[in-house]
Amino acid sequence: MKLVFVTDNGFSEKNGVYYYSAPNYTHVRHLKPYFSDFVFVARKDKYDSSSFKIGSNRDSDVHLFNKRNVFEMIKLLKEQIRGADFVICYGITGYFACQIGKKYGVPTIAYNGGDVYEFLKSRGTLRGQILAPIMRHLEEKKFGIADYAHYCDGFLVDRYPTQGKVLVASGVSIDIEEINLEKRIKKIRSPNTGRPVIGLIGHTKNNLKGIGTAIRAVAKMGGDVELQIVGRGEHAQYDVLAESLKVKDSIKFLGTLKAGDEIFNWLDNIDVYIQPSLVEGLPRATIEAMSRGCPVVASNAGGLPRLIDSEFRIEFGDYVSLAEKLTGLLSDEYLMEEQAIENFEKAKEFSSDIRIKKYDEFYSDVIKSLERKNRNLLY
């Protein structure tokens, strides 16, 4: 089965080698049991050292286009979708792919990993305000005509309804081990000889992950904690903010950590994880923190209310509430332990076994539908 994988971003090329981002890598890995051949069509992004290697120009079916060249994009999509078995459609490029797929009779799978309308509105720019309703309309049209739909979380189903068969499953797939909770309980009960450590994962390109809110919360707490931030990007603007609030010594930017052991080891050594984001889908970072038994304080963005109790959620930007909730947690060992257990149990809903079962049911039906259609064409 040949799948054309169409997306807006996360693909790059360097020295004749193609790369894709961690989210794209995860999506493809989850799809490989169902499709034998992959063709990638995406905008060409700037190379990022945290990306995963796809292969060289000689052995990879990758087609990247300049984001300003719409005609090149349409040409590539037509060439690659014609004759394919399926096309999976992410983002605005996916909207055009979905239209072309319908034209050529190729079954289409629309995908949504987060609300583009919320993302653009939240940027606070005139361009974002103008584009937000346009992009929402195109996303609605994409899901309206798609044969199948894959959403990362249930809240997106109502926002972008479809007539096709639906899969609601995030790309998060975690192996849950009871020993991780045991280690967390032991950590909570052990005397803390240093400052409590608060952790946050998020890129620093803009404030969508709430890094500014987190720094202000640390200042509100008197700088008696250490905030560690994992993620790529420059952080000069946050250094200035921390300096102005006199908490620069309490803020540590760790850069990028490798997925897997490096992230897990870091999570095991923090005391509380926070996700004070403005926009989210269903964040993998939060679920991974929960799987390590971390107490969590988060915003109400996207799918976070599905994960975190209302008692430990804040409105975006409310650093006062964030500081209060963190102080309450860190001063109450019983509450820390209670939240560790509750979050750990919640994370089990995202175990590999559950994710695989959902994917198997959906994609097996998708492929069987095509096989039935092809048999009917023979008679």
Image (cartoon, grey):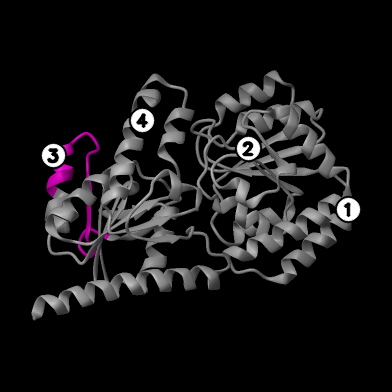
Residue 278: where, in percent of width, then height? 55, 34
Q: Is residue 71 magenta?
A: yes
Instruction: Say what amino acid the circle numbered 3 marks.
Output: Phe
Query: What residue is at 33 percent from the left and 43 percent from the top?
Result: 140
Identify the residue under disc 3.
Answer: 71
Determine contact: label 1, label 2, CB under 8 Å.
Answer: no
Determine contact: label 2, label 3, CB under 8 Å.
Answer: no
The span shown in magenta is 56-75
Query: What residue is at 23 percent from the left and 48 percent from the top?
Result: 64
Q: At numbered mark 4, what does the secondary structure look like: helix, strand or loop?
A: helix
Identify the residue under disc 1.
Answer: 334
Looking at the picture, tell me which residue is in the foreground, 123 or 231.
Answer: 123
Query: What residue is at 57 percent from the left and 61 percent from the top?
Result: 260
Whichever of callouts 4 and 2 sits on the residue coming sooner in the sequence is: 4
Q: At numbered mark 2, what does the secondary structure look like: helix, strand or loop?
A: loop
Point out which mark residue 133 bears: 4
From the viewer's perspective, is the residue at label 4 or at label 2 nearer? 4
Q: Residues within 10 Å of mark 1 (few under 14, many from 20)?
A: few
Whichever of callouts 1 and 2 sits on the residue coming sooner in the sequence is: 2
- Distance between the Cα atoms at labels 1 and 3? 60 Å
From the viewer's perspective, is the residue at label 4 or at label 1 nearer? 4
Whichever of callouts 4 and 3 sits on the residue coming sooner in the sequence is: 3
Point out which mark residue 276 bears: 2
Whichever of callouts 2 and 3 sits on the residue coming sooner in the sequence is: 3
